[in-house]
Image: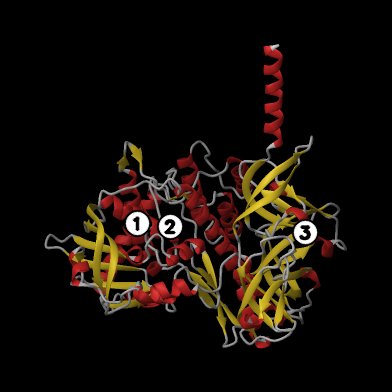
């Protein structure tokens, strides 16, 4: 009898456990129909959520969802129980006026409710005005609408401005700081007290200068230089001490963490910190005393680092250089502080050569910049290339970053490593590497895949061999795509691409939150007051995600400007290089202006039936054998430029059909 009761109780307990829904956390993706799917890292399949079970959650929100049904095919269905974090609180759309109030209808292809705007929060906006609205109160139940306020009225002539703002909002970056954050920022003292200086190493008498882009305002790094009596050099890398001003637990810190990074669009910067901090208080402006966190090195003329010191400092920047000014000094061997600049450049060359000798991979990169008129319209495209002035700063920043990471990695608390936001880069993915190696072999380039070091050496040899050859562009691009994505994590596995065992981001705290975290932990270690952050890995994941979102926003904004630029040349023909291939067509980047568009396979159907050959990165004509392969040069015609979709459509131009009388239109030459 007792056994029967025990068995019955066990069955009841199992039924109760199965009836209690499992609650998991994930990111919600909405389809146009309103059906939701929650993506959870720990689960192989997503969780379907019907429109009636979303409970105010919107596309991109981080939610807690209860799994209420599991089907035999593995499909799960759930109900949103809580919105953990909103992806965005600001939206662009149109006002619909009522009596004493308005409703805001967002411009989005994702389902979302209209937003109620009380009359006192309209800020002068009228019926049908296009506005930016911020949600100030989310609905408590399904039948209540969220409440918002108008924060910007968009004018018809401000189409560029609206497009850039929408890109930022789509990526989850707010357009403004809260009044509380601005107020906290304004209260921060601009004067440095003698008491604060007494706690720091005083470097104000040492020659110090900054080197930055010509249009930069947030100078977060400076270099000091002095020659020692024995002929060696004492060189300091000084970084804005943002952590002194932005303290944990403040509104300012919470908003900086939520953004996690500044976003750089063609015509603006959406900063991580309010302008008073990023451009005034912490910016290492010339002829001003500033608080910094520094790494100071004793270096021999041969580039050997004999000693290093890490700690908080106070500096005085003697001069603000642009990259162009420093490049002129390097090339002409003359100019202000020329001896110091040339010696720094000599050491940077030595560091760079040693890095590549130790296994760093020498991928080159080009950055496209737009010349804009007063309305934000692109009137020219410039290609920014990395020159020695850029590499000078790069090498000293890399030195500071890896020095800090190595110092922290050597510390222990209770015999355990200290949680720290390392910047890591995994070894190449074997699955991605094999087809690339096979493709490179077709151009006569061999690869040793026996070890990660051998792979890096093979990459460097290939990059050296292809310089100036037709396949250079395609192999560089494909090589980069085989690489893992760098990210932040407390798991210190090293940085494969740079060839460093220890690496972190320490040198840009004005624009990157992980650098602020690194400063705080470093200071605690130096003070011997470390309290390990148990949530650091979660924070690393957040900052990595925000970094990716910023990169996507920057790509979207650049694409918008490309489309805007090429809109003037619809119907014209240009030479380009195939930059990507898929089953539905191939992408072509114009040679002169780096504007990429798609040639649809549908537009090629009159010529042949083309199939995608993945292993050869090409489209192959089944009848003619005609190949469109990555890296091939082709002629294209611009047939459409869609600003709404940020999309350029090209059409292949058969070279033989170009008449001798008709020479393709040339756009103004790209500046370098």
Spot occupied by residue 412 in the image (x, y as percentages of width and height)? 31, 41
Image quarter of residue 166: bottom right
Specify which label sits upstream in the sequence, 3 or 1.
3
Mark 2 or 3, nearer chain start: 3
For label 1, the residue is 520
Measured Cα–Cα span from mark 3 to mark 1: 43 Å
Residues under numbered marks 3 and 1 in contact, where contact means CB atoms less than 8 Å apart: no
Q: Residue furthest right?
A: 606
Q: Secondary structure at mark 2?
A: helix
Callout 2 touching callout 3 (CB < 8 Å): no
Residue labelled with disc 3: 34
Of helix, strand and loop, which one carries label 1?
helix
270 or 328, nearer to the observer? 270
Circle 2 residue: 514
Residue located farthest toward the left when viewing the structure as drawn: 229
- Residue at screen point 54% across, 49% down: 484
Q: CA distance from mark 1 to mark 2?
A: 10 Å
User: Is the residue marked by circle 1 packed among few (<14), some (14-19), or many (20+) residues within 10 Å?
Assistant: some
Task: Note whether 113 is above or below 150 in the view shown.
Answer: above
Q: Nearer the viewer, residue 514 or 672?
A: 514
Query: Dot 3 lies on which element?
Result: loop
Image quadrant where residue 143 sits: bottom right
User: In this image, 304 relative to 560: left or right?
Assistant: left
Q: How many marks?
A: 3
Q: Position of residue 144 (x, y in %)?
A: 71, 65
Q: Kindly identify which numbered label has been placed on residue 11.
A: none
Q: Residue at x 77, y 74 (%)?
A: 640
Mark 3 or 1, which is nearer the eye? 3
Crowding at label 3, few (<14), some or many (≥20) Cα neighbours within 10 Å?
some
């Amino acid at each position: 009898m007792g056994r029967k009761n025990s068995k019955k109780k066990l069955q009841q307990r199992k039924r109760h456990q199965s009836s209690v829904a499992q609650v998991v956390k994930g990111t919600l993706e909405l389809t146009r129909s309103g059906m939701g799917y929650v993506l959870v890292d720990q689960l192989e399949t997503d969780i379907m959520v019907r429109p009636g079970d979303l409970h105010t959650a919107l596309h991109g929100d981080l939610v807690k969802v209860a799994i209420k049904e599991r089907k035999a095919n593995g499909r799960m269905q759930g109900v949103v129980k809580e919105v953990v974090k909103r992806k965005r609180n600001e939206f662009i759309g149109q006002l619909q006026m009522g009596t004493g109030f308005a409703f805001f209808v967002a411009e989005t292809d994702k389902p979302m409710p209209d937003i109620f705007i009380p009359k006192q929060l309209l800020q002068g906006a009228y019926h049908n005005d296009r506005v930016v609205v911020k949600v100030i109160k989310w609905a408590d139940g399904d039948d209540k609408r969220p409440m918002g306020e108008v924060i910007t009225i968009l004018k018809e002539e401000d189409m560029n401005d609206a497009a850039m703002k929408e890109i930022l909002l789509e990526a989850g970056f707010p357009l403004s700081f809260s009044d509380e954050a601005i107020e906290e920022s304004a209260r921060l003292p601009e004067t440095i007290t003698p008491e604060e200086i007494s706690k720091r190493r005083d470097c104000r008498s040492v020659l110090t200068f900054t080197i930055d882009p010509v249009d930069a305002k947030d100078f977060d790094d400076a270099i000091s230089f002095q020659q020692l009596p024995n002929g060696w050099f004492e060189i300091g890398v000084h970084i804005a001490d943002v952590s002194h001003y932005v303290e944990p637990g403040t509104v300012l810190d919470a908003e900086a963490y939520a953004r996690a990074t500044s976003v750089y669009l063609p015509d603006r910067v959406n900063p991580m910190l309010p302008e008073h901090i990023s451009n005034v208080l912490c910016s290492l402006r010339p002829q001003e005393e500033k608080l910094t966190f520094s790494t100071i090195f004793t270096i021999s003329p041969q580039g050997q680092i004999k000693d290093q010191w890490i700690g908080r400092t106070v500096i005085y920047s003697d001069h603000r250089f642009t990259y162009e000014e420093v490049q002129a000094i390097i090339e002409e061997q003359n100019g202000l502080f020329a001896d110091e600049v040339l010696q720094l450049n000599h050491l940077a060359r030595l560091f760079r050569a040693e890095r590549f000798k130790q296994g760093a991979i020498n991928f080159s990169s080009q950055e496209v910049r737009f010349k804009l008129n007063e309305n934000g319209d692109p009137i020219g495209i410039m290609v920014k290339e990395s020159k020695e002035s850029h590499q000078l700063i790069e090498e000293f920043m890399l030195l500071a970053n890896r020095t800090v990471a190595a110092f922290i990695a050597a510390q222990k608390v209770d015999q355990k490593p200290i949680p720290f936001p390392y910047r890591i880069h995994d070894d190449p993915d074997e699955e991605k590497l094999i087809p690339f190696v096979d493709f490179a072999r077709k151009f006569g380039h061999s690869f040793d895949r026996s070890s990660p070091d051998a792979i890096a050496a093979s990459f460097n040899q290939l990059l050296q061999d292809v310089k100036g050859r037709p396949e250079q562009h395609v192999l560089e691009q494909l090589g980069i795509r085989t690489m893992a994505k760098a990210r932040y994590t407390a798991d210190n596995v090293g940085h494969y691409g740079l060839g460093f065992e220890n690496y972190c981001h320490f040198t840009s705290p004005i624009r990157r939150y992980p650098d602020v975290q690194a400063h705080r932990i470093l200071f605690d270690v130096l003070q011997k007051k470390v309290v390990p952050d148990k949530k650091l890995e979660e924070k690393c994941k957040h900052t990595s995600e925000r970094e990716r979102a910023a990169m996507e926003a920057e790509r979207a904004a650049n694409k918008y400007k490309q489309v805007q630029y090429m809109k003037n040349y619809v119907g014209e023909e240009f030479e380009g290089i195939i930059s990507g291939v898929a089953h539905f067509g191939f992408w072509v980047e114009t040679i002169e202006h780096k504007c990429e568009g798609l040639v649809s396979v549908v537009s090629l159907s009159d010529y042949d039936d083309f199939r995608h050959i993945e292993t050869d990165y090409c489209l192959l004509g089944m009848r003619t054998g005609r190949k469109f392969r990555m890296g091939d040069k082709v002629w294209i015609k611009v047939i459409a430029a869609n600003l709404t979709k940020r999309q350029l459509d090209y059409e292949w131009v058969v070279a033989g059909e170009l008449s001798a009388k008709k020479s393709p239109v040339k756009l103004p030459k790209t500046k370098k």
